[in-house]
């Protein structure tokens, strides 16, 4: 009986992990469309991500949705729609659940630079104070109210990222 239960559990885990590929293969298709500069098709595929099956292995679903947000932001950025790209990144609060926080925060800075220009962004970062924030309950987050840009920059501290901001 114990062997049967073990084998049944193992098969169940294999199928649930295998089903994860469906969602991530969809994200790979989106990346292919972005590389081919077919943003309309890429956005259409991204609409299917919410219904995609990422399985039940760890934080796979959160990771998949976070990757989708990064891709969506990159699409809008490639279309020079920096405000929309920034909004997509701000809506992505799955940072500690498998998302690439450093890339997300770097894209935020790139969008701000594109919208406001290097000097205004640098001055705004230097003239305001960092504060501890509680947006993300799973990790240490900080925010800086960039008053001159009318923007609250919320991010997870990553040493390399912070050094980039300080030495922009």
Image: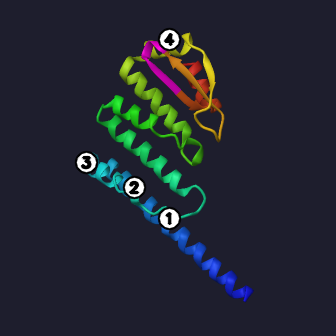
Q: How much space separates mark 1 and mark 2, taking CA atoms? A: 12 Å
**13 horizontally vs 116: left or right:** right
State the residue at coordinates (45%, 63%). Answer: 53
State the residue at coordinates (42%, 22%). Answer: 113
Residue range (magenta): 147-153
- CB-based contact (under 8 Å), mark 3 and mark 1: no
Question: Which residue position is annotated with label 3?
Answer: 40
Label 2: how many residues lie within 10 Å, few (<14), some (14-19) or many (20+)? many
State the residue at coordinates (56%, 31%). Answer: 155
Q: Is residue 61 magenta?
A: no
Q: Which mark is residue 159?
A: none
Residue 111 versus residue 146 in the image, above or below: below
**74 horizontally vs 14: left or right:** left
Q: Which mark is residue 20?
A: 1
Q: How much space separates mark 3 and mark 1, taking CA atoms? A: 25 Å
Question: Which residue position is annotated with label 4?
Answer: 123
- CB-based contact (under 8 Å), mark 1 and mark 2: no
Q: Camera-side residue: 147 or 107?
A: 147
Question: Which residue position is annotated with label 2?
Answer: 49
Q: How much space separates mark 1 and mark 4, taking CA atoms? A: 44 Å
Secondary structure at badge 2 equals helix
Label 3: how many residues lie within 10 Å, few (<14), some (14-19) or many (20+)? few
Question: Could you tell me residue 34's position as x and y percent?
Answer: 33, 48
Q: Which is more N-terminal, label 4 or label 1? A: 1
State the residue at coordinates (45%, 21%). Answer: 151
Q: How much space separates mark 4 and mark 2, taking CA atoms? A: 38 Å
Q: How much space separates mark 3 and mark 2, taking CA atoms? A: 15 Å
Secondary structure at badge 1 equals helix
């Amino acid at each position: 009986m114990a062997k049967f239960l073990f084998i049944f559990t193992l098969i169940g885990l294999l199928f649930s992990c295998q089903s994860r590929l469906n969602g991530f293969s969809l994200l790979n298709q989106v990346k292919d469309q972005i590389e081919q500069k077919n943003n309309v098709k890429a956005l259409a595929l991204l609409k299917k991500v919410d219904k995609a099956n990422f399985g039940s292995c760890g934080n796979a679903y959160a990771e998949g949705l976070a990757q989708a947000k990064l891709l969506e932001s990159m699409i809008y950025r490639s279309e020079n729609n920096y405000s929309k790209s920034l909004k997509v990144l701000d809506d992505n609060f799955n940072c500690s659940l498998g998302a690439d926080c450093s890339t997300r925060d770097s894209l935020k800075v790139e969008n701000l630079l594109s919208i406001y220009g290097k000097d205004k962004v640098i001055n705004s970062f230097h003239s305001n104070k960092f504060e501890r924030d509680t947006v993300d309950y799973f990790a240490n987050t900080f925010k800086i109210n960039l008053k001159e840009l009318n923007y609250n920059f919320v991010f997870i501290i990553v040493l390399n990222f912070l050094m980039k901001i300080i030495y922009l």
